[in-house]
Amino acid sequence: MSRRWVIAALILAVLVVGGVFEFSRLRRRVSTLSAQQPTEAEARRDVVAPQISTPTDVQSPAQMFWLAPGSSDTLAQSTIQIALSSDPVERAKQVLAALITQAPTAAQRTLPADATLLQFYILPDETAIADFSDELASETPSGILSEQIAVDSITRTLAANVNSIVRLKILIHGQEADTLAGHVDLTGFFPVGAQPAVPAPVPSIAPGLLNQHDSTTPGARATPSSAPFPTAAPG
């Protein structure tokens, strides 16, 4: 073999070896960057529901209700430190956001990780309206137990942290849903904390917040309170 061919073969070998090392380096770099990137759901949640903060926020203990360790049907109270507002609406948003994002383990989650609290209102009669993204309904496991656990974790967390709410209405993407995932009835209200001796007149909600429809539901469902549903916006 001529000297020219030997030199060409050596150059080619060097290029091949260099290419292998460079490919390995790039692959490690891509893996590192991928691990650092938020998931699509997390990125969407950060855009739709950025961190809630107000001028009155103070790091305070919040009482949260997730599944007890090793249990699939029992809620346990956990205390975490988060920034809490003195405004009850913002405070409710903060504790519900934490309920979704700060579960101690994935097995203790009560709400889907991809779910987002879109809006939250408290009406003058202390009725709260919580509007969740579609994932609350589409990713909650279908079944009376799992659905009831999800609702109970919401109501008990609100009751423990916001003392100005007596009942809760859950909406899915601004609409009234028949059920959460096929069983628990969402057409009425869920009690939160102590109920008033004499219910106050129920104000109405702004048109467009939800579409009312006949609430007759088939089959056996776990049902919330049968109090009338508000129909126009708080002032």
Image (tube, rainbow, N blue to C red):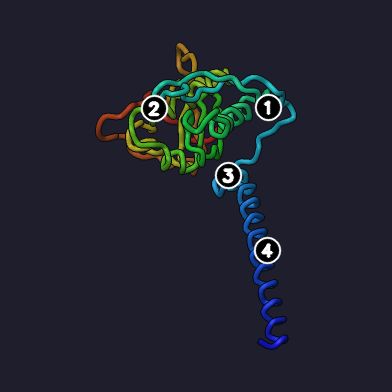
- Residue 201 visible somewhere in the drawing: no
Discs 3, 4 touching: Cβ within 8 Å: no
Q: Secondary structure at mark 1?
A: strand
* Type of the residue with mark 4: Glu
Q: Residue furthest front?
A: 1
Residue 8 pos. (x, y %): 69, 82
In this rendering, would 202 be left or right of 215? right
Q: CA distance from mark 1 to mark 4?
A: 46 Å
Callout in the foreground (3, 4): 4
Q: Is 165 drawn above or below residue 135 in the view shown?
A: above
Q: Secondary structure at mark 3?
A: helix
Q: Which label's residue is closer to the chain start, 4 or 2?
A: 4
Disc 2 residue crowd, few under 14, some 14–19, many 20+, Cα 10 Å: some
Residue 93 pos. (x, y %): 59, 31
Give me the disc on residue 148.
Answer: 2
Q: CA distance from mark 3 to mark 2?
A: 25 Å
Residue 176 pos. (x, y %): 42, 38
Disc 3 residue crowd, few under 14, some 14–19, many 20+, Cα 10 Å: some
Q: How many marks?
A: 4
Discs 3, 1 touching: Cβ within 8 Å: no
